[in-house]
Amino acid sequence: MDFSESSPQVLSIQSHVVAGYVGNKSAVFPLNVLGFEVHSINSVEFSNHTGYGKWKGHVLNAKELAELMSGLQINDLDNFSHLLTGYVGSASFLEQVYENVKQLKEKNPKLVYVCDPVMGDNGQMYVPKELLEIYRDKLIPLADIITPNQFEVELLTGKTITNEADAIECMEMLHQMGVKVVIISSSVLGPNGTLTAFGSTKGADSTEVWKLDIPRLPHLFTGTGDLFSALLLAWLHISGGNLSLAMANSLGSLQGVLHRTSAYAEEQVKQGKPYGPKLLELRLIQSKEDIEKPPQTFKAIRLS
């Protein structure tokens, strides 16, 4: 199959749930809405996300991933414009992802690799610690765009972020590893009641750094990082690499989804439904218009 004359082609390797929205369930729909063909490999296949406390399903292993990629390769179906990777739960699987990234970049040197190095948040790792070394030493140097949160940036760089200068220094350290665009998807550096996202893009002669404050909503959502990475991939492509516009559009759409989800959950609670993860599943389909036409809620501020 020749993908070159068709829509952008994304290979997305992430988790998947039957019910709800995390991983590929969060990423595929918005990418489709924005005109991208998405080819999915599910690193896990669960009934629902683990925040429910109980779930059933299975985990794809490294051998199975290699078999799927081999099948694509022998049929010339591995011509992708973009690669997106998210949650991976084992070191062996992540090592296989690394091998696949190398193969795909060898076939298409223009492939744009978006890596969300999902390892943890709020000071706690929720993947095996061995994954940190694989991300830092192997995958990050191959990535074109990365979307870690503050905690993940601190893990990757070994530096604690306490202010904007620290954030900028950490992004520069990640640029030095080979990444062109670094996004800190969320940090606690903003004013009370907000999170702050930072973005840095490195050109041949200069580096642009941006920040954007985001209102913090009083709920614990799942799948937001997966949605943000997909939106960012899309808007960086659509905008021709305009980082400030891509950040503003991505976060505008994300906030639209979260506000709609919050309103739905709060209304259901008023009607007597129990508050919990089921009510807080992202109202993604209902937010199609916010994905197609991002609310112009935010404007990025240039730092350098």
Image (cartoon, rainbow, N blue to C red):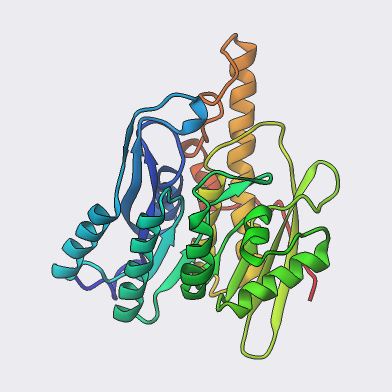
Residue found at x 58% / y 77%: 177
> Can you give x and y, in whole percent of width and height, for residue 130 in the image?
49, 56
Which is nearer the eye, 253 or 105? 105
Residue at far bottom of view: 205
Residue at far right of view: 191
Q: Is residue 110 left or right of residue 294?
A: left
> Can you give x and y, in whole percent of width and height, for residue 131 in the image?
49, 57
Image quadrant occupied by the N terminus? bottom left
> Can you give x and y, in whole percent of width and height, for residue 154 in the image?
68, 60
Residue at far front of view: 130
Residue found at x 53% / y 75%: 240
Which is nearer the eye, 38 or 293? 38
Image quadrant occupied by the C terminus? bottom right
> Can you give x and y, in whole percent of width and height, for residue 250 in the image?
59, 56
Q: Is residue 224 left or right of residue 171?
A: left
Which is nearer the eye, 60 or 304? 60
Reply above or below: 211 against 23: below
Q: Is residue 164 left or right of residue 63?
A: right
Residue 16: name its quadrant: top left
Residue 97: name its quadrant: bottom left
Give the total of numbered labels.
0
Residue found at x 51% / y 24%: 278
Residue found at x 62% / y 68%: 182
Reply above or below: 25 against 247: above
